[in-house]
C-alpha cells in the first residue's frame, strides 16, 4: 500500500498517466498535465479557473450527447499571459532560483494564482541567496508593490546593517524610495523602533503585546500553526493573529 508521504511524489512521477487536467501555457502553447486535487490545495484561483472550464466541457458534452455525438472529456485551461518556465516553477514548487528576475516573475504569478506558501518560500530564497547591498532597495520597492512582507523586512535589515553600501549601490532606487509616501518612514521605524524591540515567537504562549513585536516570519509561523491565511502585509498578518488570539 502506498503511504501518504510517498503519494505526492508518485503522483508527480505518473503525471502523464494520472493527470486529470491540462494547462496550455504561454505563446508556444506548451501543455502541462496536473491533478485537480493538488491544484485545489496549491493554487485555489487556478483550480477555480479549471472548474469553470470543466463545467463548460461538461455542458458541451451534454449538448453533444443529446445530438448523438461523442463528447470530449478532457479539460484544457489556456493560460496565455504567463511564461512556461514560471508556470513550471509553480507546479513543481521550485526550491531554487537562477536570478532575481526569475524570483520576481514567480512571485507575481503566485499572487495571481494564490500560491502563498510558495510565494513566501521564494521571498526567502531571494532574501537569503540573491539579495545584496546593490539590489536591496530595488527588492524593497518590489516587495512594497507586491506585498512581500518577508522580502521587505530582509531588505530593510540589509539597509540597517549596511546603510552606506546600500545607498551608494542603489542611487536610482534610493531616489524612488525618497519619493515614496511610506517607505522612508518604514525604514526609520524598522531601524530605530521595530528591530530593537523584537521578541521571539513561542508556539505555546501568545499575548497581544508579544504578537505586536513578532517579526514577519514569526507571524507567519503563528498563522500556519493555526491553519490561517499567510498572505498580506505585516500589518494584515498582525491583525489576523490578534483577531484569533484567545480572549483577543
Image: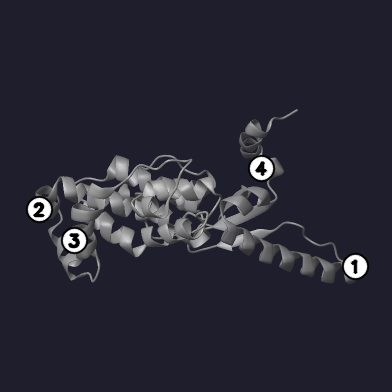
Residue position marked by numbered label 3 in the rendering: 173
- Residue 240 appears in the figure: yes
- Residue 147 appears in the figure: no
Q: Residue at x 38, y 60 (%)?
A: 233
- Residues at discs 4 and 3 in contact (Cβ within 8 Å): no
**Whole-Å distance between the Cαs marked 4 and 3?**
45 Å
- Residues at discs 2 and 1 in contact (Cβ within 8 Å): no
Of tags 4 and 1, the one toward the viewer is 4
For marks 4 and 3, the one nearer the N-term is 4
Residue position marked by numbered label 1 in the rendering: 68
- Residues at discs 1 and 3 in contact (Cβ within 8 Å): no
Q: Is residue 17 left or right of residue 106?
A: right
**Whole-Å distance between the Cαs marked 4 and 1?**
30 Å
Residue position marked by numbered label 4 in the rendering: 16
For marks 2 and 3, the one nearer the N-term is 2
For the residue pair 228 and 109, the one nearer the viewer reads as 228
Q: How many neighbours does mark 1 have within 10 angstroms: few (below 14), some (14-19), or many (20 or more)?
A: few
SS at circle 4: helix
- Residues at discs 2 and 3 in contact (Cβ within 8 Å): no
Q: Residue at x 16, y 61 (%)?
A: 174
Of tags 1 and 3, the one toward the viewer is 3
SS at circle 3: helix
Of tags 2 and 1, the one toward the viewer is 2
Q: How many neighbours does mark 2 have within 10 angstroms: few (below 14), some (14-19), or many (20 or more)?
A: few
SS at circle 1: loop
* 227 w.r.t. 10: above or below: below
Q: Residue at x 83, y 71 (%)?
A: 63
For marks 1 and 3, the one nearer the N-term is 1
Residue position marked by numbered label 2 in the rendering: 168
Amino acid at each position: 500500500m502506498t503511504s501518504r508521504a510517498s503519494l505526492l511524489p508518485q503522483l508527480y512521477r505518473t503525471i502523464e498517466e494520472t493527470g486529470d487536467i491540462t494547462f496550455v501555457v504561454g505563446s508556444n502553447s506548451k501543455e502541462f498535465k496536473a491533478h485537480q486535487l493538488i491544484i485545489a490545495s496549491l493554487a485555489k484561483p487556478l483550480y477555480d479557473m479549471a472548474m469553470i472550464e470543466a463545467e463548460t466541457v461538461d455542458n458541451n458534452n451534454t449538448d453533444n450527447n443529446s445530438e448523438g455525438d461523442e463528447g470530449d472529456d478532457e479539460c484544457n485551461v489556456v493560460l496565455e499571459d504567463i511564461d512556461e518556465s514560471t508556470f513550471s516553477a509553480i507546479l513543481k514548487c521550485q526550491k531554487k532560483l537562477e536570478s532575481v528576475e526569475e524570483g520576481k516573475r514567480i512571485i507575481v504569478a503566485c499572487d495571481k494564482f494564490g500560491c502563498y506558501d510558495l510565494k513566501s518560500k521564494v521571498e526567502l530564497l531571494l532574501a537569503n541567496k540573491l539579495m545584496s547591498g546593490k539590489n536591496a532597495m530595488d527588492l524593497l520597492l518590489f516587495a512594497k508593490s507586491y506585498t512581500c512582507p518577508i522580502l521587505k523586512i530582509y531588505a530593510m535589515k540589509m539597509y540597517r546593517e549596511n546603510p552606506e553600501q546600500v545607498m551608494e549601490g542603489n542611487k536610482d532606487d534610493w531616489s524612488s524610495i525618497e519619493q515614496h509616501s511610506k517607505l522612508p518612514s518604514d525604514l526609520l521605524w524598522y531601524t530605530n523602533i521595530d528591530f530593537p524591540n523584537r521578541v521571539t515567537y513561542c508556539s505555546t504562549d501568545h499575548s497581544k503585546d508579544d504578537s505586536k513585536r513578532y517579526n514577519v516570519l514569526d507571524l507567519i509561523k503563528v498563522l500556519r500553526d493555526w491553519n490561517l491565511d499567510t498572505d498580506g502585509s505585516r500589518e494584515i498578518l498582525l491583525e489576523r493573529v490578534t483577531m484569533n488570539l484567545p480572549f483577543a
